[in-house]
Amino acid sequence: MELSSGTVLAIIGAAISMGLAAIASGIGVGLAGIAGAGVISEDPKKFGPVLVLQALPQTQGIYGFLGAVLILIGVGVLGGAVKEIPMGMGYAALGGGIVIGLSSFTAVAQGAIAASGMGAVAKRPETFGQAIVLAVMAETFAIFGLLIAILIFVGTKIMGG
Amino acid sequence: MIRDVLSYLYVNATVMAKEGKFISAGRWDDLWGCASPGEVASLLEGTDYFPYLSEGAVHEAQALERAILEEFSALGQEISKIIPKGAWPIREYLLKKWDVINLRTALRGMHGGLQKEHLMDSFLEGGELSVTFFETLLDAEGMDDFVALLTGTPYQALSEGLARYYETHNLFFLESLLDKVFWEDLWTKVLKARGIKEFRAFVEVCVETHNLKIILRAKSDGLLREDIDPFLIPERTIIDELLSTFDEEDLPGLLPLLEETPYFEPLVGAQHEYERTGSVVAFEEVLDSQVLNKAQDIRKKKPFGPGPLIGFLVSKETEVKNLLAIVRSTEIDLSRDEVRESVMRK
């Protein structure tokens, strides 16, 4: 099957969106997981709050997945009929994928915050709510990244075209 | 940055979880008023100390003290196993501390002429030297023999204090040398080690307070500069000015020389208590508080590095010191306020 250059660029955009987000979320979840193991080794009853905090950096991975799926649907890779899309749209899809992929690196900081939050919760269980709020703050920029990517996809007719 | 964060993540989370099990303010309130080891032991239920309490700990202050120290020693060993490789001086600090504690016990036993069987159970695992080694020290026939048995260990330097010890029969000289060996060795190592500047800053304060305690105690006891030189850790600029006028000034006259240092205000604050009691303990207490403050300061400034670990170690040591003071107070007749005053430094 011959693919147009625009379509290939869009597929690369999808790969970047998911690939970078997976790396970033993996690091974030890993950081939180190490701290979580430290807390649980001392107090297994803290598994619940630890699990919630560890899950937070996973959301950037979900955004990356969502961005990749939107691009793949837009170019018809998902759905059976691959479209021939122009180079300009291909670059736009690539840009959207890059935005999502890079903004996903907020998951690394979020993992570090979640790790500290676990320590705080282990010391004072009543700080669980505050620990979540602090960790969620880092999420904001990943959401902005996803929004900008969606605006690019809509504006360039990759979505809804 | 990520490497720093990663290497301390597990240990910091573990120690923060351990901090969650520190004795609460409410329980301290009850502990101040304890009149017997049994009462203290019952209040330790649910804490990390409880599994170490033997039957004897309920009736005997000495057994209770040992249980508290056993928990502290086991904690040190546990933490030393999870400390990042790059932070090896912190591991040395944790382990060698127990050598010093055991040696101090043996020294005091030898000085006080205690029977070997009374001291055999006083030594605790956790240091670099074995408990058997400390038991052998108890076979010494005198302090000369005792110090000779330390040959080959870092503590052989205690021989430098033997002459003054025999002259005065004051254990201060040997104990000061013991502390000097510990802090000087650690200080030399942290100066060479990389990536642990926060711990270096902490050790620096410990070294400075060690020197200041010796200077202030020596001045209070009317000693001369040449008497204390072997007990001070050199290369700390803070003591240069103090030593240059040591023989001319009296104790209150030495304090203004520290004006540019963080020790000045706390020491001046303790001057009234010193004048009231005539004891340098007032100064020693504020210097100990400076060590605690430094650890807490590092903790706040470096929350992702060794800060929480250093803060935890010092807080735990303070908790243990306070608990031991409460246990010892059950053997003497002290009021609740007197106990509280003597231990409330946390």
Image: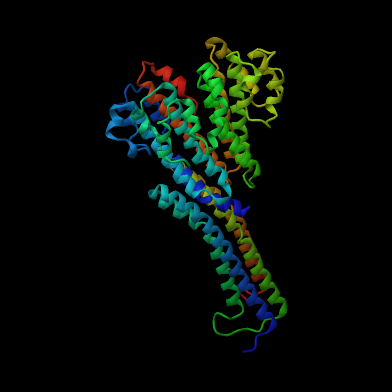
Residue B229 x/y as whole percent = 64, 24
Q: Tell which of B207 and B9 is nearer to you.
A: B207
Residue A121 x/y as whole percent = 46, 45
Q: Is residue B259 above or below residue A51?
A: above
Q: Residue at x 68, y 84 (%)?
A: A4
Asked if residue B117 lies left or right of residue A98, the reply is left
Q: Is residue A20 above or below residue B161?
A: below
Q: How many marks?
A: 0
Residue B182 x/y as whole percent = 55, 34
**Could one spot residue B21 in this view of the protein?**
no
Q: Residue at x 41, y 34 (%)?
A: B23
Quadrant, the C terminus of chain A: bottom right
Q: Residue at x 64, y 71 (%)?
A: A153
Q: Tell which of B164 and A135 is nearer to you.
A: B164
Quadrant position of residue B136 = top left
Colour scheme used in the picture?
rainbow
Looking at the image, the residue that sits furthest to the bottom is A1
Q: Is residue B199 above or below residue A142?
A: above
Quadrant, the N terminus of chain A: bottom right
Looking at the image, the residue that sits furthest to the top is B276
Residue B20 x/y as whole percent = 44, 40
**Could one spot residue A134 in this view of the protein?**
yes
